[in-house]
Image (cartoon, rainbow, N blue to C red):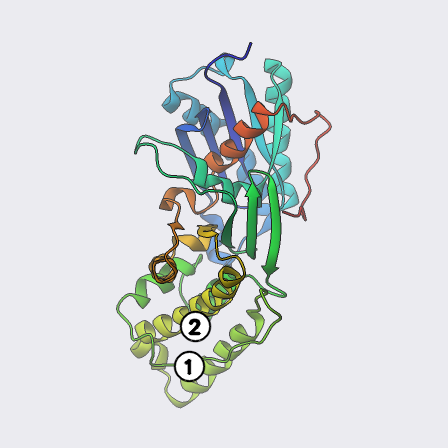
Amino acid sequence: MQKKDIYILAIESSCDDTSVAVMRNHFVLSNITASQKIHEQYGGVVPELAGRDHEKNIVPVVSAALKKAGIEAKQLDAVAVTSGPGLMGSLLVGISFAKSLSLALQIPLISVNHMQAHILAHFLEDEKGKKETPRFPFICLTVSGGHTQLVLVKDHFEFEVLGQTIDDAVGEAFDKAAKILGLPYPGGPFIDKYAKEGDRNRFNFAGSRVPKFDFSFSGIKTSFLYFIRDHVKADPLFVENNIKDICASYQEHLISSLLKTTALALESHTTCDLALAGGVSANTRLRERVVQLTDNRKIKAYIPPFEYCTDNAAMIGAGAYIKFLRNEFSPLTLLPDVKMHL
């Protein structure tokens, strides 16, 4: 007979954040993340350096998560880990540690798809209290530095990709523009910050035409590069004097592109509510416009708390708990899948 509460230690190390959470069922007891600062000087994540930092961070972050949760390792019922997609070296560190812990404690190992976990973050509970969760089926707009997808979520682990980017992810489009503007990495939050005080309609950028529910952001990045180059040639202080309006206009263009396609998907699935997931879902203007879109359509918007938008181990724990209940465990021969699909 299954005991009432299940304790799971979850590990997320797919990119440059070492995150560990301790879960009691769907409740987050702790969610500790060590972010790597070393990549700022390079303007992007360096895979080799990311792997090395994960090796340094994993033990102290696990210890901190257990301590905050008030749980001893021997009380754990399972250990969960991101198995993909992500950087090979980064995934290897998390998976190797998880397998070792599973073997040492003689507890099950649970592998979780990183992109599925972003969506399942909507089912987390924490000290802020129980919140309303999406009803199946619902549409989820998943937006991050590596992915941009519209997903029809039929059940916890039943997904249908309605559309996705045919080239670059929207998060990459934010970070690339920030780099061109000379803003620190990661640049998305800085664009969001400046955009709050800028004129969203001052500058226009070229768009891309793509089939039905798909997205494209390579063209806008090229358009932005030429836009800045030409204006700086005429006025060397153009960026400095217009940074707020540039950020506001560029951000509005990207968000409008996202939501135009999302609206088409909602028209084809009229009974579905809309959820937001992924690192870019922390963008304040996107969150605002998603609420506007759903209010106009008389449907509900589900937007995750900021701490569950970016990569974090609690979302891995959310998927792991459901898998635990279904007895879906992984063998100790588990290997990373850097290109794992939803």
Find residue 254 and report its horizontal and vertical position in percent. Answer: 45, 68
Residue behind mark 2:
253
Residue lying furthest bottom in this view?
A: 234
Comes first in the chain, label 2 or label 1: 1
Element under disc 2:
helix
Quarter location, residue 240: bottom left
At horizontal 42% and vertical 42% (from top left) the residue drawn is 308
At horizontal 45% and vertical 26% (from top left) the residue drawn is 22
Closer to the camera, 224 or 46? 224
Q: Do residues under tags 2 and 1 come within 8 Å of each other at their CB atoms?
A: yes
Q: Which mark is residue 191?
A: none
Query: Is residue 86 visible to us here?
Result: no
At horizontal 50% and vertical 80% (from top left) the residue drawn is 206
Find residue 79 and report its horizontal and vertical position in percent. Answer: 56, 24
Residue lying furthest left in this view?
A: 197
Residue 166 sits above or below residue 25 on the image = below
Q: Which mark is residue 204?
A: 1
Query: Is residue 342 visible to us here?
Result: yes
